[in-house]
Amino acid sequence: MNDFAFSTVAHVVSETGAAGRLGQHIQSRFPNVRRALLVTDPGFLKTGLVDAPAASLRSAGLAVEIYSQVVADPPEVVVLEAVGAARAFRADIVIGLGGGSSMDVAKLIAVLADSDQPISGIYGIGNVKGARLPLVQIPTTAGTGSEVTNIAIVTTGATTKMGVVAPQLYADLVLLDAELTIGLPPAVTAATGIDAMVHAIEAYTSKHKKNPLSDILARKALGLLSANLITVCENGRDLAARQAMLLGAMLAGQAFSNAPVAAVHALAYPIGGIFHVPHGLSNSLVLPHVLRFNAPEAAGLYAELAEIVVPAATGSAEARAEALAVAMQQIATVTGIERTLQQVGIVEADLDRLADDAMLQTRLLGNNPRLVTREDARAIYAAAL
Ligand SMILES: NC(=O)c1ccc[n+]([C@@H]2O[C@H](COP(=O)([O-])OP(=O)(O)OC[C@H]3O[C@@H](n4cnc5c(N)ncnc54)[C@H](O)[C@@H]3O)[C@@H](O)[C@H]2O)c1
Ligand SMILES: [Fe+2]
């Protein structure tokens, strides 16, 4: 077995209704904090589900400010504005309450609000200096796993994103509360759920950092996600299934935070960057085609995962790996999300640019079980067209 290291968030509470008791959770873990900044986006604010956690904080004696201007794939200017809001309010604890976008912004606020470092100095791996404000993460999508990752992704140009990777980005506390996710629209539920499944699949086949803890987490995550995804798309109010999705997405996040994702994400990023397709959907569009491309190197591992996602699959490792690809395509079909690049407005003439951009994702491509050349990337996009 290879040597490995594994890190994650120290405290996790998976409990339907936990967000309504946020004040008590914070009081017991951070008795000295007084001024809480809740970070969310306008879409989630509109659901009214911010009210209960905010009220709970107030009844625990904390002053509360809600920053609700996060946008999907947050641009740098939004992060800086949010940091400014935290400073103006003199926040002493930051709470991400939303999808990956809000949680990523919360991480960066916690790091930058009390620091002299400019944001330009923290991009890349291990460049954050010093301590951060206390940080709590409460996901409202079951997707990115950002609540337990040490990564924040910022949109830095018209089509470019940069990542901040640092141990300080691991939160102090995570609450998983299905009540927050009941209003998540079916299409967002499907795409974010597939994103979480991709995290588990790519962690399990990650080339250099695959490790036994990530493997266990990825397998458990895939079991929960594949058993509950269709249910929550068909009946968004099924709290038990919603809680299982949140848990699955978090376990997948713990897995890929230590055994990083690969070509599916590398090829998805340009789709999101250039065409503003949501992260989960971008992944879903290329997923089956990357699985088929990788099969010559990874069929054995995919077959192990097929036993979880499609237990009825039989035959050779290659046959079961193909069954996994088909099962993932079926999830997209049943949930009614887009299945081809053309459906999101991409045409043949765009494929060269997509392939060029995907090749820039060297960090991710290096984790892929099979070497991806530029021609391979273009062929995968062509298959997904
Ligand atoms: N840090 C990481 O580890 C990591 C990993 C993957 C992706 N990301 C980043 O995460 C972001 C994507 O996050 P996401 O897919 O969770 O989506 P998101 O946070 O961008 O939210 C998507 C939409 O869903 C709405 N929404 C969220 N929760 C809702 C709820 N409970 N009810 C109703 N509407 C709700 C929001 O208002 C928003 O319009 C991207 O910026 C991506 O780069 C980060
Ligand atoms: Fe992802």
Image (cartoon, rainbow, N blue to C red):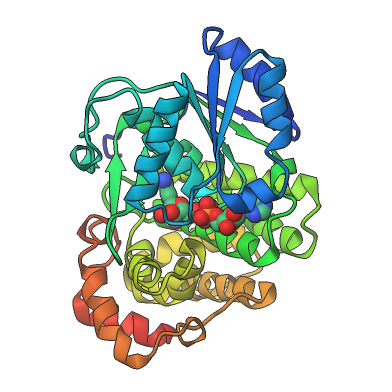
Q: Residue at x 43, y 83 (%)?
A: 384
- Residue 104: tell me if it is visible: yes
Residue that extends furthest to the top in the rendered view of this protein: 32
Image quarter hosting the N terminus: top left
Outermost residue on the front side: it is 88
Residue at the far bottom in the pictured view: 348
Q: Position of residue 238 (x, y in %)?
A: 81, 51
The one nearer the camera, 375 or 186, is 186
In the rendered image, the vertical position of residue 102 relative to residue 358, given as above or below: above
Residue 268 position within the rendered picture, expressed as x and y whole percent measured from the top left: 38, 68
The x, y position of residue 226, in whole percent, is 64, 58
Ligand 2's quadrant: bottom left
Residue at 51 percent across and 59 percent down: it is 195
Lateral position of residue 260 relative to residue 86, left or right: left
Which image quadrant is residue 48 in? top right
Total number of numbered discs in the rendering: 0
Residue at the image position 27 percent from the left and 39 percent from the top: 2
Residue 237, position as x, y percentages in the image: 81, 53
Q: Is residue 356 above or below residue 245?
A: below
Q: Split into 4 quadrants, where in the image is the C terminus?
A: bottom left
| Frontmost residue, 149 versus 109 | 109
Instruction: Answer whether residue 310 is visible to the viewer in this image.
Output: no
Left or right side of 24 for 83: left
Choose between 103 and 216: the one closer to the eye: 103
- Pick the front one: 364 or 175: 175
Q: Is residue 34 above or below residue 104?
A: above
